[in-house]
Image (cartoon, coloured by chain):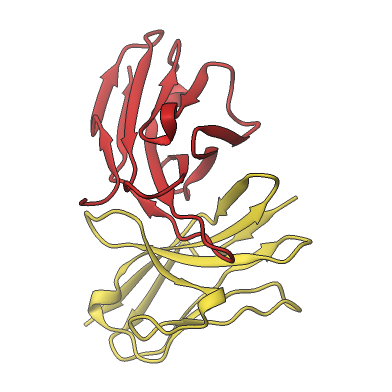
Chain colours: A red, B yellow
Amino acid sequence: DTGVSQNPRHKITKRGQNVTFRCDPISEHNRLYWYRQTLGQGPEFLTYFQNEAQLEKSRLLSDRFSAERPKGSFSTLEIQRTEQGDSAMYLCASSLREPRTDTQYFGPGTRLTVL
Amino acid sequence: AQRVTQPEKLLSVFKGAPVELKCNYSYSGSPELFWYVQYSRQRLQLLLRHISRESIKGFTADLNKGETSFHLKKPFAQEEDSAMYYCALVFNTGGFKTIFGAGTRLFVKA
């Protein structure tokens, strides 16, 4: 296992199109996170899964965004009717539940450009 | 509301000089704080976490609850320390939520 992987690495789309990103976490990790990062900012939390359950979702996430993690393995993040403001790096991270901490391992990210 | 503030966007020091990257947080509960680092063309990775009270690559960070700070320090900076550094707060809301600061770019000059 070489760590968290994300596909595609780059996506260019036209405004109004739907896009879907995939994240494959480290195999034994039961927690999975999605973040969005824009230039000059730190990663912004979008949503969090523990196994297949989506336990936390940012209020910043509009109804156009949806995430799934079927069977508690890989996860997908879909953005419907993309807007230019959705252009960003989308990061995925996974972690293994530990009693007192939560070290997250990040993927390389998917860079989305909406024209 | 929970918040993480890194007041410096850019910090430039000479090799061998001490370095301190500031992080202040706002959280009413018991915080879990982390420093993540991103080197050029690499993915974001953990540097250290407050709960471990460890020193990684010569860096240390002490949680000061009175000042709500978690500053990252290194007594002698090296050129390979040049990177983007993010402070992060993790808290439990039923699920786990993480808030990152905006980051500080550290540039160590030869």
Q: Pinpoint residue B18: horizontal percent, then vertical percent.
A: 41, 89
Front one among A110 and A114? A110
A109 to the left or right of B64: left
Which residue is at a point 47% across and 50% down the rendered structure image?
A: A42
Which residue is at a point 47% across and 42% down the rendered structure image?
A: A33
Which residue is at a point 32% across and 46% down the rendered structure image?
A: A27
Q: Pinpoint residue A92: horizontal percent, then vertical percent.
A: 39, 41
Q: Pinpoint residue A30: horizontal percent, then vertical percent.
A: 45, 46
Front one among A83 and A6? A6
Figure quadrant of residue A72: top left
B100 to the left or right of B109: right
Residue extending farthest to the right is B28
Note whether B12 is above or below A109 in the view shown: below
Residue A26 visible here: yes
Figure quadrant of residue A86: top left
Note whether B59 is above or below A79 in the view shown: below
- Image quarter of the C terminus of chain A: top left
The number of numbered badges drawn on the structure is 0
Which residue is at a point 67% across and 65% down the rendered structure image?
A: B31
B70 to the left or right of A30: right
Note whether A4 is above or below B80 in the view shown: above
Residue A57 visible here: no
Note whether A61 is above or below B86 in the view shown: above
Q: Pinpoint residue A100: horizontal percent, then vertical percent.
A: 59, 66
